[in-house]
Image (cartoon, rainbow, N blue to C red):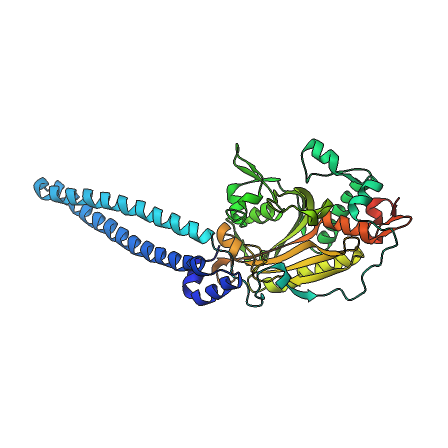
Amino acid sequence: MLQLKVIREEKTRILQGLRKRNWEGAQLKIINEILALDDQRRLNQKELDDSLAEANRLSKQIGPLMGQGKSAEAEPLKQQVAQLKEQSKQLEERQRSIETEQQELLYAVPNCPHKSVPKGKTPDDNAVYRPWPSPMPVLHEGAVPHWDLGKKYNLFDFELGVKLTGAGFPVYRGQGAKLQRALIQFFLEENIKAGYEEIMPPLLVNEDSARGTGQLPDKEAQMYACERDNFYLIPTAEVPVTNLWRGDILAEKDLPIKATAYTACFRREAGAWGAHVRGLNRLHQFDKVEIVQVEHPDNSYKAHQQMIAHVARIMKKLELPYRILLLCGGDMGFASAKTYDFEVWSAAQERWLEVSSVSNFESFQTNRMQLRFKDSNGKIQLAHTLNGSSLALPRIVAALLENHQTPEGIRIPKALWKYTGFKMIS
């Protein structure tokens, strides 16, 4: 959530940023509505403060008059105090109404893109930040996409998933299940070596947690809800992990905080199905290892680059061709100020697949969560949060199977041998 003070003091910058997100007309008017409500809130608060102060002043006069037996003189004052209390009650109700309306509008406004974010409306407008420098893999004659490899080597089964749950819930088995487990262990250990603390969070969160990281109200339609208990299945470990520090005031010396977590992730992906998302390309349930940082505002963009370099090192160890995109304003997530996407080349499908988004949210999430720190001067200010996939498994598995297939079987990258216990799937 954007800070109200920032909207008021940097209105021009905020409007320019929202235009990068292709906000126009009625959408941009929300900013003026927020500021108008804030003016009303300030005026109403002054009127409320004045009313309470006057009631307090008159009340102090009543006691001495009653003590002197001057009840007749005290009676008009009592009536005025009663009127002022009723007036204050109405003003308090109006204040709550104004604040609620203002908060709902603030929740509807996405983060303001960083000045370096390019303009654009669709993924086609994203900038290639780091291209793949080498030739793409050339597969042997008869190479097939991962969904055929899965059937051939009995690695995963979509039909069993439909039997148990429905479409988008595959069953992994045999070497396919071992490969999943190996990748999770590999990702976690790489992250831990880079200074991230391993966390094992719940897979369900409450409404405050979902709102804190920006999933609510923006992505409510994409989340699975347990309505009876008012819980949500997590779409990513970012949600519970970042909320670990919701409402906290940290010491500056404790920054940065670095955490990593493996979780299953759940997404309804409403309206996202089609031929282009066949196989493991898009699922309702999938495994992912996440990295999260809570940073000092002065250091967050340096940390952002370090996270990108960390994910790139992992990609190299998997021996996969990849590229990095800088997302345009129209393709960024609701809460992000700046996002880089990692895409891996799917050799059999001959297309790029997104496997990681590394984002800096600046103070957007921490303002919602009131996640703050006390600096060396004793000033309390909002921290910055960042997160990235390190990595999302389904498309990594798809790319590994397709890029490393040979006539003899599927070659496992050397970095995974100690985790899989085998060097080939055959």
Looking at the picture, how far across and down is residue 43, in whole percent?
A: 29, 56
Instruction: Please state which of residues 316 and 16 is positioned toward the viewer in this rendering.
Output: 16
Residue 168, image quadrant: top right
Looking at the picture, how far across and down is residue 196, in whole percent?
A: 67, 53
Give the vertical position of 25 relative to 97 (above or below): below
Q: Is residue 362 visible?
A: yes
Give the vertical position of 34 relative to 94 (above or below): below
Looking at the picture, how far across and down is residue 80, in whole percent?
A: 16, 45
Residue 195 is left or right of residue 216, and the answer is right
Residue 341 is left or right of residue 78, and the answer is right
Looking at the picture, how far across and down is residue 76, in whole percent?
A: 12, 44
Q: Quadrant of the C terminus?
A: top right
Residue drawn at point x = 69 percent, y = 58 percent = 342
Give the vertical position of 379 relative to 405 (above or below): below
Residue 306, image quadrant: bottom right
Instruction: Please state which of residues 9 and 138 is positioned toward the viewer in this rendering.
Output: 138
Residue drawn at point x = 66 percent, y = 62 percent = 325
